[in-house]
Amino acid sequence: MAGAGAGVLALGACSGITLAGTSQLGPVTTLGLDAGQVQLDLEGRSVQTWGYNGTVPGPEIRLREGETLRVPLRNGLPDPTTVHWHGISLVNAMDGAPFLTQAPVEPGAGFDYEFVVPEAGTHWYHAHVGHQLDRGLYGALIVEPRHEELSYDREYTLLLDDWRDGLDNRPENPTGHGDHDPTNSPALPADPRERVSFGGRYYPLTLVNTRPPADPCTLDVRLGERIRLRVINTAADTGFRFAIGGHRLTVTHADGMPVQHVTVDAIRIGMGERYDVLIDADAPGAWQVGVMPEGRTGYGRAILRYLDAAGSTAPPPDLHPTELDGRLLTYEDLVNTGKQETPAAGSPDRTFALTLSGTDILADGLDPTEPFLVDSGEWVRFTLRNESMKWHPMHLHGHHFRVSTAGGNGPIKDTAAVPARGGELTFDWRADNPGAWMFHCHNHYHMEDGMMRTVTYRA
């Protein structure tokens, strides 16, 4: 088996990488991004949307940690835009937060992004103006380590998305029912307090690498191989449960950061989160890669197909793998194996007590418009209590944080979901990247409704 190795890739929707060694990458990787109109075929329906370089998702970008990424953006859209590099602790001016770190790029204009990528891992990029993410302006950003410790034979990047652009313009769907509901999927809990729901908009389709259930992406494997999957939730309004029929998932990374390997049946992944998992190809056939929206019916899928059993019949679009109802990963399962820095004596220098209420982030002692002021070098603690009916995946730009768990060595992440109806989450982070940074819910509708605050370093 080989470790990871590649350059900058523009992969097809179902492309994987068969590993046969590593390639030498230069110190600077350059890839132009042209934001513009894109035509998609979704189950025979042609829809016009937005994308990068004529595709959805945009080209997969690969480079090695410590190298420089240079991206000349050209805006061919009718509206202003920016690009945010989700999961990268980059220089503030390149973060792509509109009206905070840069002015939006006007139609017909351009902006040159250039920054060092200090952290290896599975990251992604996306538009950060209005609801442009919900129209297909996103892509994977894979930063490979200088020395790959994992051993595997083949890898795939899977981008999970909720989709309605060009299909349906209804803004809300209180029941959460789409028009691709599998007949044998479990019924939603009768008591809404028992539901896990990240949003309430109506989405006719759940896509995997922009492929709908009736035209699924196929992941080819061979018996005896070990497969790495990089799973990214690019959705605007939907958290997903992810599992593969006939196979268990060994989680190796959360938000690109290494964790002690833990094997589960399924993972729950909020918007903006990423998980790397390994699977052992030991069950020949064709298996459902099931993607179940949390809190609403509907279904997305890909097919895991063994080349050793090419004649196997693909499962029907509505097949529900039993693994989706098996052991589900929690943050308590995740033990950090990367950098171990923690606050001195376990106590932070500054604490913000935050309440998530509706689509507000309320901070004790601060007005809703006041920034969270920090000093460079401080350890900062956010304690969050969610009093709303929706789970909120909270994302901090420009930094990583350690999620507090009972074991005391929780995962390093940049996006973490706070459960609804009184759910709580605490995390600590080092103020080591000066500037003004966004902290927001990664439900883009919640963010646009005001669920966003600013972290500002004092001069």
Image (cartoon, rainbow, N blue to C red):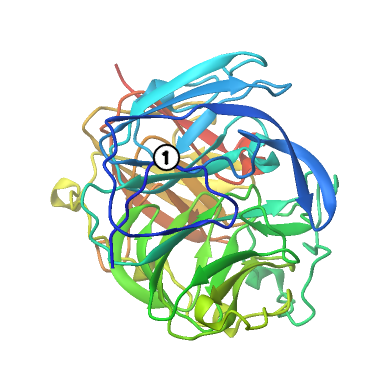
In the image, residue 77 lies at what x, y percent? Answer: 70, 24
Of 27 and 403, the residue lying toward us: 27
Residue 230 is at least partly visible in this image: no
User: Would residue 430 be found to the left or right of residue 414 on screen?
Assistant: left
In what quadrant of the picture does the C terminus appear? top left
Displayed quadrant of residue 177: bottom right
In what quadrant of the picture does the N terminus appear? bottom left
Displayed quadrant of residue 139: top right
User: Would residue 431 be found to the left or right of residue 184 on screen?
Assistant: left
In the image, residue 210 lies at what x, y percent? Answer: 66, 52
Tell me the amino acid under the disc marked 1.
Answer: Val
Q: Is residue 148 above or below residue 382?
A: below
Name the residue located 62 percent from the left edge and 50 percent from the top edge: 235
Instruction: Give the total number of marks visible in the rendering.
Output: 1
Secondary element under disc 1, as helix, strand or loop, is loop
Residue 456 is at least partly visible in this image: yes
Find the residue positioned furthest to the left: 345
Q: Is residue 37 above or below residue 155?
A: above
Q: Is residue 146 above or below residue 115?
A: below
Of 300 and 8, the residue lying toward us: 8
Q: Which residue is mark 1?
A: 8
Of 153 and 245, the residue lying toward us: 153
User: Would residue 341 be found to the left or right of residue 289 on screen?
Assistant: left
Q: Is residue 360 above or below residue 297?
A: above
Name the residue located 49 percent from the left edge and 43 percent from the top edge: 60
Of 15 and 214, the residue lying toward us: 15
In the image, residue 351 lies at what x, y percent? Answer: 33, 42
User: Dot 1 surroundings within 10 Å: few (below 14), some, or many (20 or more)?
Assistant: some
In the image, residue 122 lies at what x, y percent? Answer: 40, 50
Name the residue located 62 percent from the left edge and 37 percent from the top edge: 137
User: Would residue 380 be found to the left or right of residue 77 on screen?
Assistant: left
